[in-house]
Amino acid sequence: MIELKDVSKSFTLHNQGSAVIPVTEGASFRVAPGECVALTGASGAGKSTLMRVIYGNYLAASGQVLVGGLDVTQAEPREVLALRRETLGYVSQFLRVVPRVPTLEVVAEPLLALGRDRQVALDKAAPLLARLNIPERLWALSPTTFSGGEQQRVNIARGFAHDYPAMLLDEPTASLDVQNRETVLSLIEEAKARGAAIVGIFHDVAARERVCDREINVSEFTPGVAA
Amino acid sequence: MKPLLQVKGIEKRYGARIGCTEVSFDLYPGEVMGIVGESGSGKSTLLNCLAGHLEPDAGQVVFDTRADGPMDTVTMSEPARRMLGRTDWAFVHQHARDGLRMSVSAGGNIGERLMAVGDRHYGDIRDKAIDWLGRVEIEATRVDDRPTAFSGGMQQRLQIARNLVTGPRLVFMDEPTGGLDVSVQARLLDLLRGLVREMGLSAIIVTHDLAVVRLLADRLMVMKSGHVVEVGLTDQVLDDPQHAYTQLLVSSVLQV
Amino acid sequence: MNEYNFAYLDEQTKRMIRRAILKGLAVPGYQVPFASREMPMPYGWGTGGVQVSAATLTPEDTFKVIDQGADDTTNAVSIRKFFENTAGVKTTEETDKATVIQTRHRIPEAKLTEDQILVYQVPIPEPLRFLEPRETETRKMHSLEEYGLMHVKLYEDISQHGAISTSYAYPVKVSGRYVMDPSPIPKFDNPKLEMDAIQLFGAGREQRIYAVPPYTKVVSLDFEDYPFEATKADHPCDLCGAEDSYLDEVIMDDTGNRMFVCSDTDYCRSRRAAGHVGRLAEEDAA
């Protein structure tokens, strides 16, 4: 479902003396449907970077990134946009929201973008919020004033609103208490059960070991590190 | 899927000075393209060339018309282009005054495009106008008020209603939130986002405000001194800028 | 030397005006620019109508002038005298005897024939002028048939007054193409714009001539749910009893007495000559 072939990524900071910062080189791996693969490695090793390359948020310097058969590095913008709508979900570490939009609608957004009926979308969003222990009285409010943990849970709810065949999860259990962490892990297991291919970053070892089938240490792809 | 708009090699010069040059891109139905740049980048010149307000010195702007398929709007006859401007295209000006008739009531402003394409039932026209006022969050009771009695944000929303009432497929926007208070901007952007999605609009938005493009645009084009220096998905261009100028632009934005 | 060229204008000028008239007849309702001459009356006093009449008259014509329906107002009298002096044509007050009729702001009640020409005096020829002040823009709108704005004006009337409040100079669409200002005739007269006679419109200050040939379709603009109504005061003429003519309201004294009389003086006179009697005439007789 997700396949990387010889992907490399570096940053060139033109306004800082054209400093070149190589991050990843020769990254190759596969994730099959129903599998959950964890990206591990020290902070700054390139885990989030690699995830963003898969999503098309960062441009790969070379190599191929195939998601559901589409090469993200070569695809037309509209193809990537369609991929993100239908196939590839991404739960980042931060919730970025439009002011004024109520939480329920934030979560329903991916379904609305797919053209689902408004009420149907809201009806799917509500139980997710309930599962993640966001009180109903908050659903009509914008999440901009919520606590970090609440925002994270809204973020996760949004990420799971649509049954994506492929998902990228960046620290989904960070800043969550035991109960909510448990809920999120269940969500991930349910996604796996329906055949989603998942790439995740988990600092929490226990969480990682619970849901992930394999680990890939991105330090293997750090340039300059001997194989 | 056919592109809705194909821009090929647009160039506009002012004597020896470049207004904009070598601009080419395809826009598909439902896509929103943001064009950012600082003053003098050529973005407004480009928008005006695309929208038919300025005649480019070179290039084509091919629009997929409903009746005749893809046609170059640069060489189109003026009546046809003006008709396009009243039906399938919309233009939201930075200053609402440029896009509204200030001495005509809100209802008349919204109804004008309907009357221009042949609607002749007063009651229906008024109902549609009131419906649209609701969609842009203006109270229905204001339908007979002149725009001179509206706040800046309301005038801008009225301009949007006036433009969208005939269900255009392509909307050009020139700094749609420029000059508005921040809270008003937020409301307007939210409204635009909703309408773009509901109506399946394609849009080309010119702005110098990166937050606006982050919110509204799927794709982003960065211009400097008349040239396109970078183009790509909005989040990619803003999060992983490749060109030196884009990097400068992105890093200059103050975080709140 | 106090002999004038026939009808005051020199032949070259008449030729120029006739060309404009022919163009106007060929494109009904289209405003033809023309080089309006200085006339011996100021702008705003009918110079356009006078120039069109001067170019149209032949020595065999019989000329009538009315001003808001009346032959005997100062302006009607002076224009009639002007043509008596400069053209030597026969003049008349009887509508059915005239071959060329110059009018300010009314159409005669009597049905006009194929042998007659009606010349209107026009102040502002451009129907869109008050909505769109730019001449460049209004010309484009006419040439591209973009008349949405005209209906906006009518829409505004209904939203402000509950009905289309335009009561004179009511815009019309001529021959399905051009929107025209029929000059400040009351909207009651609009249906008469479809007639057997030639209609010529002259605006001297604005330098435009337009025309409507006989039997041309002239439709007053309206909305489906607010159709055009040619309304008039709900009274008969107090002198001749006519129910179908446009009336002037005349205040008779300072105790509120008023009378309604036909604005078309010749029409009223001919009806009374035929024996028709109105309320006041009856009271006089009594």
Image (spheres, coloured by chain):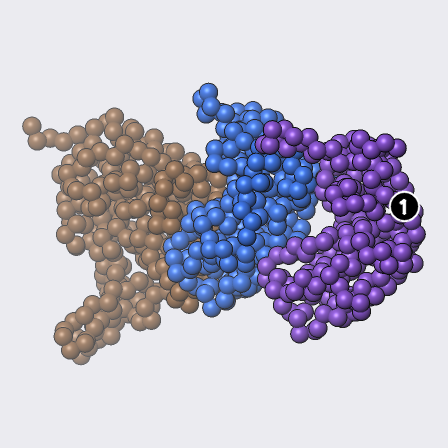
Disc 1 residue type? Answer: Val
Residue B68 position in % (x across, y down): 66, 37
Q: Nearer the viewer, residue C249 or A221?
A: A221
Pointer 1 residue:
A31
In the figure, the shade used to draw chain A is: purple
Answer left or right for C248 relative to B72: left
Residue B122 position in % (x across, y down): 50, 61
Answer left or right for B73 relative to C103: right
Residue B59 position in % (x across, y down): 59, 26
Which residue lies at the image location 42% right of the left edge and 49% below the top edge? B97
Asked where in the image residue C243 lies, by quadrant, the reply is: bottom left
Q: Is residue B146 visible?
A: no
Which residue lies at the image location 20% right of the left edge and 68% below the top edge? C250
Which residue lies at the image location 59% right of the left edge and 32% below the top edge? A15
Which chain is drawn using brown? C
Q: Nearer the viewer, residue C174 or B14?
A: B14
In the figure, the shade used to draw chain B is: blue
Residue B121 position in % (x across, y down): 53, 60
Q: Nearer the viewer, residue A93 or C68?
A: A93
